[in-house]
Image (cartoon, rainbow, N blue to C red):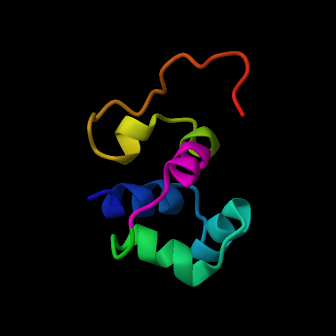
Amino acid sequence: MHKTRLKDLREDRDLYQKDIAEILNIKQQQYSRYETDINEISVTLLKELAIFYNTSTDYILRLTEEPKPYPRNKKVN
């Protein structure tokens, strides 16, 4: 469902799967499975990616075409 958007976000920043895997503290193969929609991504990792890419989880999940993130709470962990 979200495979193309994850790949597009990564490639737009000239990053490799291994780069994103390092940021998420997972193996490249595991990230690849998220990007190709073989495995479902956890809410925690989805949130981390939204923060990293400065977008919303809805955008990553293709629930909106608006890449601009929602206003965030001051205390985002």
The quadrant of the rendering that contains the C terminus is top right
* Foreground of the two, 46 or 35: 46
The quadrant of the rendering that contains the N terminus is bottom left
**Main SS type for the magenta part?**
helix
Whether residue 31 is situated above or below residue 57 in the rendered picture: below
Q: Is residue 44 magenta?
A: yes
Left or right of residue 71, residue 2 in this image: left
Residue appearing at x 57%, y 36% in the figure: 54
Residue 25 sits in quarter: bottom right
Residue appearing at x 43%, y 58% in the figure: 6
Q: Is residue 12 magenta?
A: no
Q: Position of residue 35 (x, y in %)?
A: 42, 68
Residue appearing at x 33%, y 70% in the figure: 37
Q: Position of residue 9 (x, y in %)?
A: 47, 54
Left or right of residue 36, residue 29 in this image: right
* Foreground of the two, 67 or 44: 44
Q: Position of residue 22 (x, y in %)?
A: 72, 68
Residue appearing at x 54%, y 77% in the figure: 30
Residue that protrudes farthest toward the bottom in the picture: 29
How many badges with numbers are in the image?
0
Left or right of residue 12, residue 67 in this image: left
Query: In the rendered structure, which segment of residues is drawn in magenta?
Result: 40-49
Q: Position of residue 48 (x, y in %)?
A: 61, 47
